Image: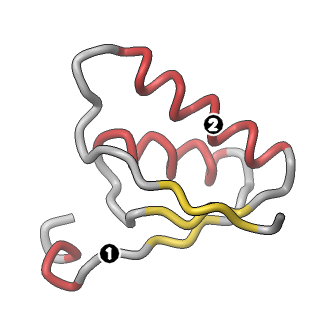
Amino acid sequence: MRRVCVFCGSSRGGDPRYAEQASALARELVSRGIGVVFGGGLIGLMGVLADDVLAGGGRLTGVIPHGLAARE
C-alpha cells in the first residue's frame, strides 16, 4: 500500500484523545512509509494529522474544494 485517504474533523472535538489518536495514526503511517491523502484543512483533527505527517517527513496530499481553500 502506498497511500491511504483519511478524512477527519475540522475541529478537535470535545475529547483530547481524538487529537492524540490523529497524531498516533500520522506517526504510524509515516513509520510504514505510507503517504496520506487528506481533506486539505489545516485546522482541527485534519490539521493535527497533517502537521504530524509533515513533522515526521511523510508524504501528504491535500484535497480541498475551491470554496473552502480561501477560508483555510
Residue located 84% across and 56% down the image = 33
Viewer-proximal residue among 56 and 49: 49
Disc 2, SS:
helix
Amino acid type indicated by mark 1: Ile
Q: Taking 69 as reference, is 37 left or right?
A: right
Viewer-proximal residue among 6 and 60: 6
Q: Position of residue 66 (x, y in %)?
A: 21, 85
Q: Quadrant of residue 59?
A: bottom right
Colour mode? secondary structure
Q: Position of residue 22 (x, y in %)?
A: 51, 34
Residue located 37% across and 40% down the image = 45
Q: Quadrant of the C terminus?
A: bottom left
Q: Are marks 2 and 1 in contact (CB under 8 Å)?
A: no
Above or below, 28 against 71 in this view is: above
Amino acid type indicated by mark 2: Leu
Q: Position of residue 26 (x, y in %)?
A: 63, 42
Q: Quadrant of the N terminus?
A: bottom right
Above or below, 24 against 35 in this view is: above
Disc 1, SS:
loop
- Label 1: which residue? 64
Above or below, 46 against 66 in this view is: above
- Label 2: which residue? 25
Residue located 53% across and 26% down the image = 21
Mark 2 to mark 1 CA distance (whole Å)? 21 Å
Above or below, 5 against 45 in this view is: below
Q: Position of residue 17 (x, y in %)?
A: 43, 15
Q: Quadrant of residue 25?
A: top right
Residue reaching furthest bottom? Answer: 66
Say few, some or many: other residues with alpha carbon within 10 Å of mark 1 (under 14 / 14 to 19 / 20 or more): few
